[in-house]
Image: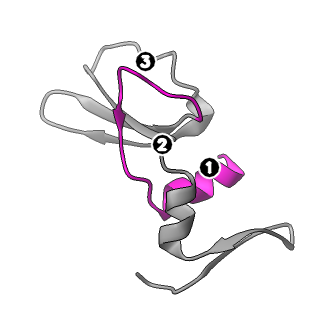
Amino acid sequence: MIADKVILLDEGSLKKTGTPDALCEEISGSVFERRAGFNENYGDIDKNMICAYRKEKDCVVIRYINKSEQKNDLLVNPGLEDVYLYYFGI
């Protein structure tokens, strides 16, 4: 890890603080990935909470934040980028 402690500020006000691992643990259960075909519709994912896209051999992997359980998608471990997006949105 780069830092022992992370501080999230929102317009100068303290929003959250903790170790990188603790902050990631707080949002555990909220970060998912979905594999979709290149022409497949994935419109049910809130576009404001998409963290990343990556292209794989035969599909696109969409990483997103959702505070409720997503049964058909893969629950993944959050990183600090996910923490930032969870608290501040895009």
Mark 2 element type: loop
Question: Of label 1 and label 3, which has the lower sequence position?
Answer: 3
Estimate the x, y position of residue 19 in percent, counting from the top left: 55, 77
Number of the label disc, if any, that sits on residue 86: 1
Name above or below for residue 35 compared with residue 78: above
> Which residue carries the number 2 mark?
29
Q: Secondary structure at mark 3?
A: loop
How crowded is the residue under tag 1: few (<14 C-alpha within 10 Å), some, or many (20+)? Answer: many
Q: Residue at x 53, y 68 (%)?
A: 22
Q: How far apart, in angstroms, are the residues tagged by discs 1 and 3? A: 20 Å
First to last magenta residue range: 67-90
Q: Gap in Å between the C-alphas at discs 1 and 2?
A: 12 Å
Let me know if residue 77 is in the magenta part. Answer: yes
- Image-quadrant location for residue 59: top left
| In this view, the mark in front (1 or 3) | 1
Q: Please name which of the two marks, 3 or 2, marks the residue nearer to the observer.
A: 2
Q: Which label lies toward us, 1 or 2?
A: 2
Residue 39, percent across and down? 30, 15
Which quadrant of the figure has residue 74? top left
The residue carrying mark 3 is 42
Helix, strand or loop at mark 1: helix
Point 51% across, 72% down: residue: 20
Position of 75 with respect to 19 (left or right) is left
